[in-house]
């Protein structure tokens, strides 16, 4: 009879996170992950079709918390600045928490094919709370893209907001 491991998917993600933080993305292997979790390699593949999917699941788990925070601020704010600041803070925090992945060349190579798909999804998610302050969906997406791009480029919130406040 196969052994039942409670919350195995969560354990796999947590161990992958640990291994990435310890040794880097490039050193993470499904074989080492399976061994550390006490399961077979095939069991890992029952949950994740690839290393990239595993890491994307880890990132998505954390990103959902960011979206929850942004949605909460957006729901109780009648002004754009607190929402934009929250988005900025969440992006900066997320990037810092996952810096080891984002700076890893092998990770960049692995995810390069799906970058535009995920970037578009991210822009759409960030635009959602901005729609109530924008005249059109395009304007909200434009602001989301500008905030995303310039935040990741290291600009301060004040620099970014100084340009954006002209829109409102």
Image (tube, helix red, strand yellow):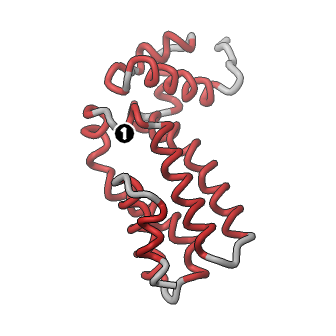
* Residue depicted at 66% across the width and 55% down the height: 69
The answer to whether residue 104 is above or below residue 130 is above
Q: Nearer the viewer, residue 56 or 7?
A: 56
> Left or right of 13: which side holds 77?
right
* Residue depicted at 49% across the width and 16% down the height: 34
Q: Is residue 35 visible?
A: yes
Which residue lies most toward the bottom here? 135
Residue 106 location, x and y as percent? 27, 32
> Left or right of 54: which side holds 90?
right
State how many labels appear.
1
Q: Nearer the viewer, residue 130 or 54?
A: 130
Quarter of the picture containing the N terminus is top right
The answer to whether residue 165 is above or below residue 19 is below
Task: Return the residue at label 1.
Answer: 102
Picture quadrant of residue 61:
top right
Residue 85 location, x and y as percent? 57, 62
The answer to whether residue 21 is above or below residue 138 is above
Q: Nearer the viewer, residue 134 or 155?
A: 155
Element marked by disc 1: helix
> Left or right of 146: which side holds 68?
right
Residue 20 location, x and y as percent? 43, 24
């Amino acid at each position: 009879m196969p052994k039942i491991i409670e919350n195995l998917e969560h354990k796999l993600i947590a161990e992958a996170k640990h291994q990435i933080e310890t040794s880097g993305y490039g050193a993470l292997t499904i074989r080492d992950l399976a061994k550390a979790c006490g399961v077979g390699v095939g069991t890992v593949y029952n949950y994740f079709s690839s290393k990239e999917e595993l890491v994307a699941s880890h990132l998505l788990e954390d990103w959902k918390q960011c979206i929850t925070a942004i949605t909460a601020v957006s729901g109780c704010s009648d002004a754009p600045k607190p929402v934009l600041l929250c988005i900025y803070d969440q992006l900066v925090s997320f990037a810092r928490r996952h810096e080891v992945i984002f700076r890893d060349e092998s990770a960049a190579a692995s995810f390069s094919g799906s970058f535009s798909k995920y970037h578009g999804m991210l822009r759409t998610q960030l635009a959602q709370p901005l729609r109530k302050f924008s005249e059109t969906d395009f304007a909200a997406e434009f602001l989301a893209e500008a905030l995303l791009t310039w935040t990741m480029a290291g600009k301060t919130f004040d620099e970014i907001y100084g340009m954006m406040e002209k829109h409102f």
